[in-house]
Image: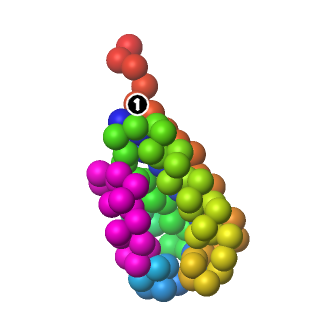
Amino acid sequence: MATLHIEHAISDFGVWKAAFDRFAAKRTAAGVTGHRIHLLGDDPQWIVIQLDFPTVAAAAGFKRFLENDVWSSSANAPGLKGGAQARVLVDAPDA
């Protein structure tokens, strides 16, 4: 399993969430098996999203899609302020 961990500033949660919801079919087609959305407790204008995938390759592919097709256009990413940070995470081995 892999998780695409995304962080970025937003201008308005409602506007951002509506845009996020419009990409539900893309997430499903890319193999997203679950997601979590968090706002920072001390900064509601900063959002953290975690998208779960069955493989690292699927997570990396969706990261490229976001970078190239979504975040590169303000029309596709309303509510986003500035650039997003995205990293693919994997579970640490049991110690």
Quadrant (top left, top right, bottom left, bottom right) of the N terminus = top left
Q: Is residue 34 highlighted in magenta?
A: yes
* Residue extending furthest toward the left: 33
Quadrant (top left, top right, bottom left, bottom right) of the C terminus = top left
Name the residue rendered at 33%, 60% in the picture: 28
Span of residues in magenta:
20-35
Q: Look at the magenta stretch and give its main secondary structure.
A: helix
The answer to whether residue 42 is seen in the rendering is: no
Is 16 left or right of 32, judged from the image as shown? right
Q: Is residue 44 highlighted in magenta?
A: no
Q: Report helix, strand or loop for mark 1.
A: loop
Label 1, on which residue? 91
Total numbered circles: 1
Q: Position of residue 65 (x, y in %)?
A: 56, 59
Q: Position of residue 15 (x, y in %)?
A: 48, 85
Name the residue rendered at 57%, 62% in the picture: 66
